[in-house]
Amino acid sequence: MKRILLIICFFYYFLPAVLLAAENNDTILSLEECIEIVIANNPDLAMARSDQGNREALLQSSQKNLYPTLSAQYSYMHQPDEVYTLPDLFTYGVKAEQPLYKGKSLVTSVKQAELSLETSKLVIEQVTNNLVFEVFGRYYELLRALKLEEEARQSVLRLQSHSKDAKAFYEAGLIPKNDMLQSEVELAQGEQDLVDAENVSAMAKSRLNVLMERPVGALLNIEESDKYTIQDISWDEVIEKARANRAEIAQSDKAVKIAENDIVLKKAPYLPSVTLSASYDRVGDDIGAAPSPGFPSELKTVKAMATWQLWTWLKDRDEVHAAEKNLQKAKKAVTRTTNEVTLDARNSYLRLEQAAKRIKVSEKAIEHAKENYRINQAQYQAQLTTSTDVLDAQTLLSQAMTNYYDALYGYQLALAAIDKSKGLFGQRYSK
């Protein structure tokens, strides 16, 4: 029995932790998998979806204002004045009302609710577009940090090798002590740079974990992505798709239509309101409305009623004037939003061109830096150059590698920025 209890305790308390650790250690997340996790768990996106559900409910509510309503009533009437000999009356009945016309407010309210729902969908698309691009940014930030950490580790190995050579040369009396000390100082600096690089990698993992709503210190392994293809992208295509697809521009267009409909709603009180109603009442002198002598036991009515509000101290005129100003504001917002989208697209396009040029330059720089380091190291082995030359060559090689990874992941992020500028992420992942 005790053995069974121990087994149960193990499975209940320890197995989930073991499985989680195994998953964290073995699972390698791709960029697409990270995007799926973020979209499934992001609170901003969840709030946007909840808002969409709210707008759907409000649309259904506004549509039901077009339908007839049914009500029931029960009343009791007592006449204390002795001049009249009316008995106490009990009345119960039902009444149906159908609104026919309210100055276009009924249909316009439905249109407003539809526009509001469409706007909420565009908000989801905008949030998704920005969110996916943020995943790209943190994913490539982590890849860059890991590559620079590995380069810092390789740099330490090169400095250790050089320090070992310098120490041997010093002990053989071939170089002065300050040359050996210089190599040891550079080694210590390289080790410090490695510590810093490891910290940068850890923080990059934490930022991606937080974006995926995972524990900040959870183990995280991602797929390497150091392959690239320089793409020929046209500026005309970028700006055309940006203006056609970006949710921000569509939202501003919807805002103009909402403002136009708001003017119609504010003008509705200028027009009459027409309602059709039908009622059935039963009247009696007891609590059950039994027929009373001298009074009709049933009352049936059908009534069409038109009401027209004639004077409200120009309140309606002021509200119409305010709505017209809101329309002007909404139209100006379209221009501002279009300009912002255009600048965002232009910035992404220029960054892409810059990153493509930097990759080509940095690749050549790496070839030269590696050859320069090899030559200086060989010459140092033959005592044809100084320790300073080798250390300078090592610094140049590390800087060339850093520049290359900056350009590589900068280019991939710039490609993602182009897709974000076109609104492609929002359309692809918000469906």
Image (cartoon, helix red, strand yellow):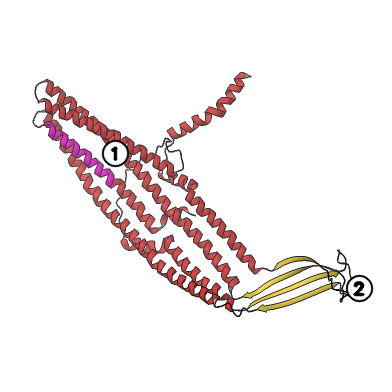
Amino acid under disc 1: Leu
Looking at the picture, does residue 164 appear above or below residue 130? Answer: above
Residue in front for this viewpoint, 284 or 95: 284
Q: Say if residue 223 shows up in the picture.
A: no
Amino acid under disc 2: Pro
Would you name the residue on which mark 2 appears?
293
- Specify whether 93 is left or right of 145: right
The local crowd at label 1, few if under 14, some if 14 to 19, many if 20 or more residues have their Cα within 10 Å, is: many
Give residue 371's position: percent from left, percent from top.
17, 38
Give residue 329's position: percent from left, percent from top.
43, 69
Looking at the picture, does residue 201 appear above or below residue 315? Answer: above
Q: Mark 1 falls on what kind of element?
A: helix
Give residue 147's position: percent from left, percent from top.
30, 39
Residue 392 is a magenta residue: yes
- Specify whether 258 is left or right of 396: right
Q: Quadrant of residue 29?
A: top left
Q: Residue at x 39, y 64 (%)?
A: 337
Q: Residue at x 81, y 70 (%)?
A: 281
Does the residue at mark 1 contact the one at mark 2 (Cβ under 8 Å)? no
Q: Quadrant of residue 24?
A: top left
Residue in front for this viewpoint, 31 or 300: 300
Residue range (magenta): 384-407
Would you name the residue on which mark 1 appears?
148
Residue 359 is a magenta residue: no
Q: Say if residue 102 shows up in the picture.
A: yes
